[in-house]
Amino acid sequence: MKRVLVAGACGRMGERIRHWVAAHEALELAGALEAPGHPQLGEEIAPGVVLGSDPGAALAGMDAVIDFTTPEATLAVLGAASEVGVPYVTGTTGFSEDQRAVVRALAQEIAVVHAANFSVSVNVLGWLAREAARKLGPDFDAELFEIHHSAKRDAPSGTALFLAEAVAEGQGKVLRDHLVLERAGETGARPEGAIGIQTLRGGDNPGEHTLYFVGAGERVELSHRSSTRDHFAKGAVRTAAWLIGKPPGLYPIETVYGLG
């Protein structure tokens, strides 16, 4: 059995990841991390697993880390993992470009998968988005809608940006040159080639994304709606099992799922 450390172990995703690690035939939950000051620190949250806050101590003897936390916390634990050679799976979103550069640099030391979404179906949706954008061509305008629970910290969602990137790739564009995140007041006509994202937050929605390709008199819609976090967690656990033993590098999630 390979030993897995879960960072953010008591969060919404962390709880489901712990469940699916425990259910995996080749993995076992062997460590759990939370932020300093967390009220459950020092408690045994699973048989033989005491919740801690020191990444260096928690990484001892681990075969992989699964992390859904914040950019700052992820970089701290990822840096510690790179020093001891432990592969790293993270679904943290909201990174700045400078923080992404740190992730890429640390991936030269250990195997890393960083993905906005670990759902198999969402990643298939990304593949479909890329192909639809390529086949439909410039006569169809691309717009995205996403909604998440009220506690989500970043907007737009990492998944929405992942889908927008797929559209841009299909259209042969650089996303940052065409991305539109806000519309208010006198905006003028829609810029040619724009890729828009609209964001809603509320309730306990785990995530909902719809991609629209809007043409003259017709439109194509591609949607994914989540009612549970389990498919995200199961995908992250599957990815950790796949990543163990791989040489250093930043592996795209498409490679894990055979989509790239």
Image (spheres, rainbow, N blue to C red):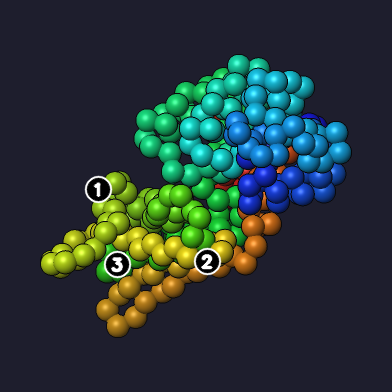
* Disc 1 crowd, CA 10 A, few/some/many (<14, 14-19, 20+): few
Look at label 3 and name its amino acid.
Asp
- Mark 1 or mark 2: which is in front? 2
Q: Nearer the viewer, residue 146 or 76?
A: 76
Which disc number belongs to residue 141? 3
Looking at the image, residue 227 lies above or below residue 70: below
Q: In the rendered view, does 169 fall on the left or right side of 119? A: left
Residue at which label 1 appears: 177
**Residue 234 place in picture, x, y as percent:** 70, 51
The quarter of the picture where residue 135 lies is: bottom left
The residue at the point 19 percent across, 61 percent down is: 191
User: Could you tell whether 136 is left or right of 259 in the image?
Assistant: left
Residue at the image point whose x is 70% and y is 30% from the top? 52
Question: Which badge, 3 or 2, comes first in the chain's sequence?
Answer: 3
| Circle 2 Cα neighbour tier, 10 Å, few/some/many (<14 / 14–19 / ≥20) | few
Residue 35 placement (x, y as % from top left): 60, 34
Q: For the residues labelled 3 and 2, say whether their Cβ atoms are less than 8 Å apart.
A: no
- The crowding category of the residue bearing disc 3, from other C-alpha atoms within 10 Å (few below 14, some 14 to 19, many at least 20), is many
Q: Is residue 18 above or below residue 243?
A: below
Whichever of labels 1 and 2 marks the residue nearer the N terminus, that label is 1
- Residue at screen point 33% across, 73% down: 214
* Residue 27, horizontal then vertical, whole percent: 80, 38
Residue drawn at the location 57% of the way across and 61% of the way down: 206
Q: CA distance from mark 1 to mark 2?
A: 33 Å
Nearer to us of marks 3 and 2 is 2
Q: Are marks 3 and 1 in contact (CB under 8 Å)?
A: no
User: Outermost residue toward the top?
Assistant: 83
Which sits in the foreground, 32 or 114? 32
Q: Nearer the viewer, residue 60 or 130?
A: 60
Q: Amino acid at mark 1?
A: Asp
Residue pointed to by mark 2: 203
Q: Earlier in the sequence, mark 3 or mark 1?
A: 3
